[in-house]
Image (cartoon, rainbow, N blue to C red):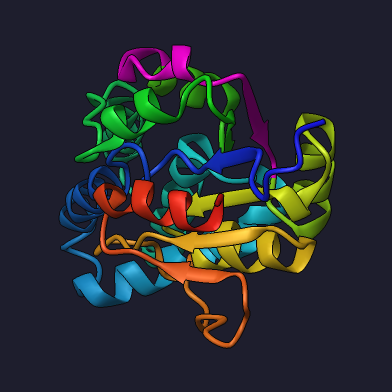
Amino acid sequence: MNTRPLAVIGFDADDTLWQNEQFYRLTEEHFRGLLADFAEGEQISQRLLEAEKRNLSHYGFGIKGFTLSMIETALDVTEGRVPTEVIGQILSIGRDLLRHPVETMPHARDVLETLAGDYYLVLITKGDLFDQERKLAQSGLGDYFDAVEIVSDKSATTYRRIFGKAGDGPERAMMIGNSLKSDIVPAIAAGAWGVFVPHELTWVLEQVEKPAEAPRFREIANLGELLPLIREIGR
C-alpha cells in the first residue's frame, strides 16, 4: 500500500504553465484605442472590468465572455452610438485572442517531465472548453498529464471532487497555480497543499490575501523551485 504524503499534483494552466494574461492586456489596449474618441482610457478599462464582473455568472471565464463584455462596454461608453465598424473590430480582436500563440513558462516542461510517472498529474483549468483544449494541444504538454479537468469555477468542492477521483482525496494532493483566489485558497480549504507561483500580470479579479498562516501554504518564485519543495513535502 502506498502511504507517501503526496500522490496527486494539480497544475493550473493559464499564467502557470503558459502565458495568457499578457494577451488580454494587449487586447484591452487595442480596445481602449477603438473608443478613444468617447472616453479616457482608464474610464474605459474600469467600465470593462465592471462588465466582466457582471457577466461572469452569465458567460463564465474566457475569451468569448471577454469579447461580449467589450461589446457591452462599447455600447455603454458611447451611449449606444458605437459605430458598427467598431463592433466589427471588437469581434476581430476577440478572434485574434483565440489564435494567439502558446508560450510555455520557464521550467514548465522540465518539471512535468520529471514528475510524470512518479505522481498522478492533473491539469485543472477554467475557461472556454475549446480554447483551453487548443492551448493544451499547442503547448505540447498534454502527454504529461494523467487527467485534464476544464471547469467553470474552482472551489473547495471542485478540488475535493477532482482529488477524490484522482487519488485518496485532497490530503495527499497539491495544487500549483498563480491565482490565490482560484488555485490556492480553495485547494487549501479542501485540505490539499497550495503552492503559489506569482505572475506579474494576474487578473485583478483573481487577487486575494495570501493565506500566509495556513500550514499547507507555500510560495515559490517560479516553477524551477517546485521540485525541491515536492521532495521535501513528499518525504
Q: Nearer the viewer, residue 118 or 22?
A: 118
Compared across the picture, whether 143 is left or right of 42 comes to right
Is 18 placed above or below 153 here? above
Number of disc labels: 0
Nearest to the observer: residue 59 or residue 5: 5
Please indicate, yes or no, whether residue 205 appears anywhere in the rendered image.
Answer: no
- Foreground pick, 233 / 27: 233
| Residue 46 part of the magenta-drawn span | no
Span shown in magenta: 137-152
Q: Residue at left 76%, top 42%? A: 3
| Residue 108, horizontal then vertical, whole percent | 30, 35
Q: Is residue 14 above or below residue 53?
A: above
| Extreme residue toward the bottom, this view | 213
| Residue at (57, 45) in percent of width and height | 61
Q: Position of residue 86 (x, y in %)?
A: 28, 41
What residue is drawn where x is 40% and y is 42%?
A: 14
Reply yes or no: does residue 147 show up in magenta: yes
- Work out which quarter of the rendered image holds the N terminus and state it: top right
